[in-house]
Image: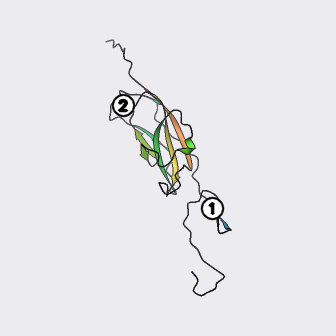
Amino acid sequence: MPDTETTTTYELNLMVTALDDETCVNSNCVLISVNKPSECTITPPDTNTFCTAEASNLRHTYTTAATPMHVQQKWWLLSDPVESPESVSFNTANPVGTGNSASIKFSGVEPGKYWVYTGYYAKNAGPDGHDMPLTWCMSPVIVVAVPGNTITVT
């Protein structure tokens, strides 16, 4: 606020999470340098097919490059098909990890096709913030059951 009744210059400090490169307040616009995360790529385990009967403590690790410091990262195991991957909210239930890696166990998972999904979200993402991914990536997974008529030959 000005020290006098009139002033021609104001100083304003804004803390924003910008998704666009132009922000306007009361018809005054300013260009903001937006530092969006680059495209992500998931590095999966050596195989993408897992058995429901594997040991319950066995986990398989998925990784990306280091999480950029201006975002936060979350992981999910989503059933196929994923209709709108760009709409997987930060608030989506049952995340399987945070940060640049997730260790997932497939023991007890229903057989079928899944996607390991990760998204980069704004630092203020959550119930009161922008909760859609700034960028995302997925890796396919097949979960199979042990056949009921398995014959073991010794």
54 shown above or below 76: above
Cα–Cα span, label 1 and label 2: 46 Å
Mark 1 vs 2: CB contact within 8 A: no
Residue 138: percent from the left, percent from the top?
A: 53, 39
State the residue in front, 60 or 134: 134
Identified by mark 1, the residue type is: Ser
Dot placed on the residue nearer the N-terminal end, 1 or 2: 1
For the point 51% across and 41% down, the residue is: 42
Number of marks in the rendered image: 2
Q: Which residue is mark 1?
A: 33
Q: Could you say which disc has been placed on residue 115 in the image? A: none
Residue 65: percent from the left, percent from the top?
A: 51, 47
The quarter holding residue 3 reads bottom right
Image quarter of the C terminus: top left
The secondary structure type at the circle numbered 1 is: loop
State the residue in front, 117 or 67: 117
The secondary structure type at the circle numbered 2 is: loop
Q: Could you say which disc has been placed on residue 108 in the image? A: 2
Instruction: Answer left or right for 97 relative to 81.
Output: left
66 shown above or below 113: below
The quarter holding residue 83 reads top right
Mark toward the viewer: 1 or 2:
2
